[in-house]
Image (tube, grey):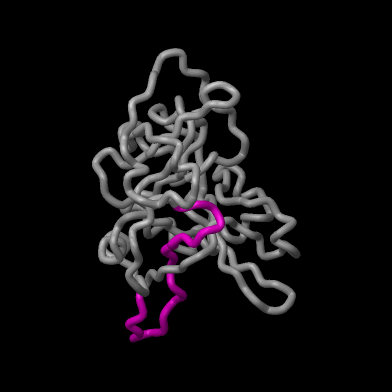
């Protein structure tokens, strides 16, 4: 996520608390920015309609007793989220937008080899992934704000790389997506693959696989041999990385 605070505020019409540096390699369990609908302000209040939340990337259901015993859910299948106890309440009351400049994905080539891709909007700019937020409370009263990104079937551009992709919410759909009065069934049509020409996938080096590599050069294009490529990886319930 390399956009500035001003760019985030402009696109999401939200109040963002402070400036932040560009981040070129965000990994699960690290903080991510989420934009959410604010609580209904009292009449005459000048409170913003949308606010930012910094959450731990890795959704923990409120009912989980010990997060260490719970699988790391940084991605959430949109097709079944409304049916699962882990996500049902968040999908109704705590839908969020996740500002992003793009994501990384791996295309498996054989059993031991994989090619990394930097997937970004073809025309650049900031985008919004669909997210869910949940606050987990421990027995001692401490709390952790957590979140995950909703995924859907890959479009025809990304399907050769992976069977899944993040749900992208268009700016014209921000209002219905964030509106807590809308039931999950009212926004189900928004959780669909983005159009085929929206993203481009740029092959990059495997340096993105190490979280300590955070400089912009990890997004530089590399040359790859496109002959004899294997079938895209089977769906395993999670994208390999964002």
Give the x, y percent position of residue 195. 35, 35
- Tell me if residue 234 comes above or below residue 21 in the rendering: above
Which residue: 44% across, 43% down? 208
Q: Nearer the viewer, residue 188 or 117?
A: 117
Residue placed most toward the observer, 181 or 103: 103
Q: Is residue 80 above or below residue 61?
A: above
Where is residue 154? Give x, y as percent: 46, 33
Q: How many marks?
A: 0
Residue 83 placement, left or right of 12: right
At a point 69% along the width and 61% down the height, the residue shown is 67
Quadrant of the image occupied by residue 158: top left
Can residue 230 be found in the magenta stretch?
no
For residue 36, which quarter of the picture? bottom left
Quadrant for residue 2, please give it.
bottom left
Name the residue furthest bottom. Answer: 44
Of residues 26 and 7, the one nearer the viewer is: 26
Residue 229: x percent and y percent? 47, 18
Range shown magenta: 26-48
Residue 38 colored magenta?
Answer: yes
Quadrant occupied by the N terminus: bottom left
Residue in view at x 49 percent, y 50 percent: 211
**Residue 100 percent across, percent down from the top left:** 37, 52
Q: Is residue 103 visible?
A: yes
Picture layout, residue 85 above or below residue 18: above
Q: Is residue 186 visible?
A: no
Residue at x-position 56% and y-position 21%? 110
Q: Mainly helix, strand or loop, the magenta region? A: loop
Is 64 positioned to the left or the right of 80 in the image?
right
């Amino acid at each position: 996520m390399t956009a500035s605070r001003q760019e985030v505020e402009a696109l999401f019409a939200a109040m963002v608390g402070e400036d932040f540096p560009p981040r070129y390699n965000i990994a699960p369990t690290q903080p991510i920015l989420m934009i959410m609908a604010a609580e209904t302000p009292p009449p005459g209040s000048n409170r913003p309609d949308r606010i930012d939340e910094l959450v731990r990337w890795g959704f923990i259901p409120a009912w989980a007793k010990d997060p260490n015993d719970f699988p790391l859910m940084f991605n959430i299948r949109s097709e079944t989220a409304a049916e699962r106890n882990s996500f049902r309440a968040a999908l109704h009351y705590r839908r969020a937008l996740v500002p992003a400049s793009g994501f990384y994905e791996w295309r498996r080539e054989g059993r031991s080899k994989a090619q990394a891709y930097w997937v970004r909007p073809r025309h650049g700019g900031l985008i919004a992934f669909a997210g869910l937020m949940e606050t987990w409370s421990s027995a001692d009263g401490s709390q952790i704000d957590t979140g995950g990104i909703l995924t859907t079937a890959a479009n025809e551009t990304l399907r050769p790389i992976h069977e899944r992709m993040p749900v992208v919410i268009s700016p014209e759909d921000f209002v219905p997506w964030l509106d807590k009065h809308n039931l999950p069934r009212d926004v189900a049509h928004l959780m669909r693959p983005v159009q085929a020409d929206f993203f481009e996938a740029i092959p990059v080096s495997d340096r993105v696989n190490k979280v300590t590599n955070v400089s912009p050069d990890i997004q530089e294009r590399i040359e790859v041999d496109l002959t004899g490529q294997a079938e895209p990886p089977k769906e395993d319930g999670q994208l390999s990385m964002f």
